[in-house]
């Protein structure tokens, strides 16, 4: 069994090992994307509080709207509970765009979009620098190559465990040590075997959850195994809550709101219901001290926690005409598929346990990125190095 496992481990790992190294190492960088971005651009994300109250939300949104081109509108604003953090005014285009503003002074601090560096690392991690796949463009070869590589990686990890597993558990402690004073070949061998064993569980967790973004058939099976039915509209469709943020529809709604209010060009870039955002924010804050609240044209989304499912949120409806707060769709009452999708993201990225789990995931991903490299070294040394020469001399 061990011989078969060794052979399978070798030939599963050789073809696409470099792809696995790229995926793992880029994933290690992405583990602390938010923290690194906020560290480098700290003046954008943190402000000095003033004794005076923070400016009204619609006034901050209006300040941003005056700087926007005609094709871009304000779609919402995100307000953190931390008084030292800036607010994010959400934009209709490009996807995920936002502007950071000082809530006390009303000054624009910069963009909240993903930085070019991390955007490139993310493309490398998910699609090997291929463009993001869109419907009608045919197969996404970058995503397919990454997906196939990760599938082989899962099998390689399992066969590697079987190949390493001792016949007897006596002396197991000695086999779990990594020696740094026994020479480079011994060190690299133990980094490959023992290091891989230490990172095994987290690497399998990251791989098995990450595959849900690679293959629809795997995603459907993953949800089914966990007893969750995946709605048809979510097969390759938009994430739940992505309600046509930009394009013709958004511009049409903005124009309709402008006509009803008879406002000038600056107000055209704002949802008509933005005038009710201050009172809606105050009302939702009275319900529960949420860590973050996002107000949009027809709903208020309140983030439940910064740990666990980091995408969990309670959603409040309101009347856009009067600003009266309506019912609440609690996260606990949301569809199982939506809750599971949030958990998959949180578990895949390590965000579920805060900075500690992110650190563990980062270290595991770094180890995972070295496994193919040390494996190639051991293979080459065994095949063409001193060990191979000794075997040929004996024969």
Image: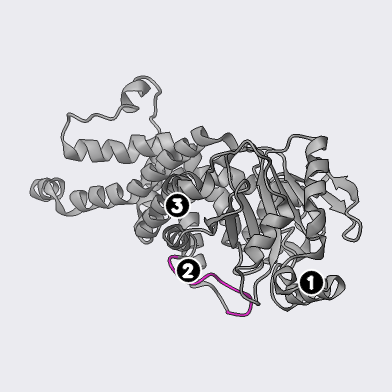
Q: Earlier in the sequence, mark 1 or mark 2?
A: 2
Q: Nearer the viewer, residue 152 or 307?
A: 307
- Looking at the rendering, the stretch of residues picked out in magenta corresponds to 128-137
- What is the number of the mark on residue 142? 2
Q: Nearer the viewer, residue 131 or 193?
A: 131
**Colouring chosen for the image of the structure:** one colour
Q: Mostly what secondary structure, the magenta segment?
A: loop
Q: Nearer the viewer, residue 126 or 14?
A: 126
| 10 Å crowding of disc 2: few (<14), some (14-19), many (20+) | many
What is the x, y in percent for residue 354?
Answer: 55, 35
Labelled pair 1, 2 in contact (Cβ < 8 Å): no
Asked whether 133 falls inside the magenta stretch, the response is yes
Return the residue at label 1: 263
Q: Marks 2 and 3, how far apart in space? A: 16 Å
Q: Marks 1 and 3, how far apart in space? A: 58 Å
Q: Earlier in the sequence, mark 2 or mark 3?
A: 2
- What is the number of the mark on residue 153? 3
**In the image: residue 300, left or right of residue 311:** right
**In the image: residue 375, left or right of residue 132:** left
- What is the number of the mark on residue 18? none
Which quadrant holds the N terminus? top left
Kindly state the secondary structure of the residue where label 1 is placed.
loop
What is the x, y in percent for residue 95?
Answer: 61, 66
Residue drawn at x 80%, y 73% is: 258
Vertical order, 283 against 120 (above or below): above
Vertical order, 182 against 244 (above or below): above
Any part of residue 168 in sight: yes
């Amino acid at each position: 069994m061990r011989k078969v496992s060794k052979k399978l481990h070798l030939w599963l790992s050789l073809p696409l090992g470099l792809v696995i190294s790229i995926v793992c190492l880029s994933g290690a960088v992405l583990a602390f994307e938010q923290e690194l971005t906020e560290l480098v651009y700290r003046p954008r994300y943190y402000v000095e509080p003033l004794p005076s109250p923070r400016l009204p939300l619609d006034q901050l949104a209006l300040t941003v709207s005056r700087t926007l081109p005609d094709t871009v509108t304000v779609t919402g604003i995100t307000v953190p509970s931390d008084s030292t953090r800036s607010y994010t005014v959400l934009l209709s285009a490009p996807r995920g765009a936002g502007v950071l503003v000082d809530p006390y002074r009303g000054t624009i601090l910069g963009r909240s979009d993903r930085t070019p560096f991390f955007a490139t690392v993310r493309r490398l991690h998910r699609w090997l620098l291929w463009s993001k796949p869109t419907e009608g463009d045919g197969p996404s070869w970058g995503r397919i190559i990454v997906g196939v590589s990760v599938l082989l990686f899962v099998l390689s990890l399992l066969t590697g465990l079987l190949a390493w597993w001792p016949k007897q558990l006596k002396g197991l402690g000695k086999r779990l040590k990594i020696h740094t004073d026994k020479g480079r070949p011994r060190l690299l061998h133990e980094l490959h075997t023992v290091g891989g064993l230490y990172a095994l569980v987290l690497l399998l967790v990251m791989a098995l959850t990450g595959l849900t973004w690679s293959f629809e058939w795997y995603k459907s099976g993953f949800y089914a195994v966990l007893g969750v039915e995946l709605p048809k509209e979510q097969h390759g469709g938009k994430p739940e809550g992505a309600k046509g943020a930009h394009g013709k529809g958004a511009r049409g709604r903005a124009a309709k709101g402008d006509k009803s209010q008879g406002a000038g060009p600056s107000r055209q870039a704002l949802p008509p219901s933005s005038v009710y955002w201050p009172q809606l924010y105050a009302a939702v804050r009275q319900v529960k001290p949420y860590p973050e609240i996002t107000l949009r044209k027809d709903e208020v989304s309140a983030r439940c926690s910064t740990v666990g499912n980091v995408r969990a949120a309670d959603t409040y409806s309101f009347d856009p005409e009067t600003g009266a707060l309506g019912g609440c769709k609690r996260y606990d009452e949301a569809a199982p598929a939506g809750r599971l999708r949030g958990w998959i993201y949180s578990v895949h990225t390590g965000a579920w346990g805060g900075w500690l789990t992110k650190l563990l995931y980062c270290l595991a991903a770094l180890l995972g990125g070295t496994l193919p490299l040390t494996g190639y070294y051991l293979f080459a040394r065994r095949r063409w190095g001193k060990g191979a020469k000794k075997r040929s001399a004996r024969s």
